[in-house]
Amino acid sequence: MNTSVEKKSGNLLGIPTSDTQNISQHLNQLLADEHVLYIKMRNFHWNLVGPSFVEIHEFIEKLYNQTALDIDLVAERIQQLGHAAAGSMAEFLKIAHLKESTGGKKEQTQAVRELAEDSDSLARTLRTMISEIDEQYDDPGTVDLLTGILRTQEKNAWMLRRYLG
């Protein structure tokens, strides 16, 4: 990105342009993980089977709606930093740490277990990102965004684990 503000100051949003690339790489990896999780949630929402179908079906819908909002915030932050957000499933699958789940009927306990594990994994990844961005890049805007997403993932993991007993 070559805006006049960036050319004159050597930074964008008060962040050195050399740092915005590294921050955006972290955010694109998060964006990829969130997309894999979102698609997994949609898959389970559609294909769930079990005695608590309605309750879990509706709960998973709430989770994927929140994840969609978080996805948008992360993509917008990447743009604010002057970089392009990844935008294809091929890109997401290449850089994501989370793994897809196959389609077809999914027993509710297994679906909830997988989502809880993914939320736990995403929370660990977010903690690492927050530390690195805070310590190495001094970007409180991104740290604040990531902290909010971390709180959501921690709550999701807790609620999913509670279902498992």
Image (spheres, helix red, strand yellow):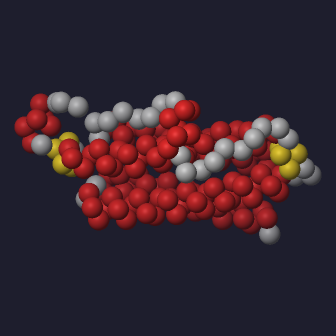
Query: Horizontally, is 163 left or right of 7 in the view?
Result: right
Query: Horizontally, is 53 left or right of 4 in the view?
Result: right
When asked about the image quadrant of residue 128, the answer is: bottom left
Foreground of the two, 43 or 146 = 43
Residue under the image location 12 percent in, 31 percent down: 4
Query: Horizontally, is 153 left or right of 78 in the view?
Result: right
Residue under the image location 72 percent in, 44 percent down: 101
Residue under the image location 39 percent in, 61 percent down: 130
Q: Position of residue 117 (x, y in %)?
A: 66, 60
Outermost residue on the left side: it is 8
- Whether residue 53 can be seen here: no
Q: Position of residue 16 (x, y in %)?
A: 18, 48
Foreground of the two, 11 or 63 = 11
Residue under the image location 10 percent in, 35 percent down: 7
Q: Position of residue 135 (x, y in %)?
A: 29, 65
In the image, is residue 50 above or below residue 81? below
Q: Position of residue 153 (x, y in %)?
A: 57, 57
- Whether residue 121 can be seen here: yes
Point out the image quarter for the N terminus.
Answer: top left
Query: Horizontally, is 36 left or right of 162 in the view?
Result: left
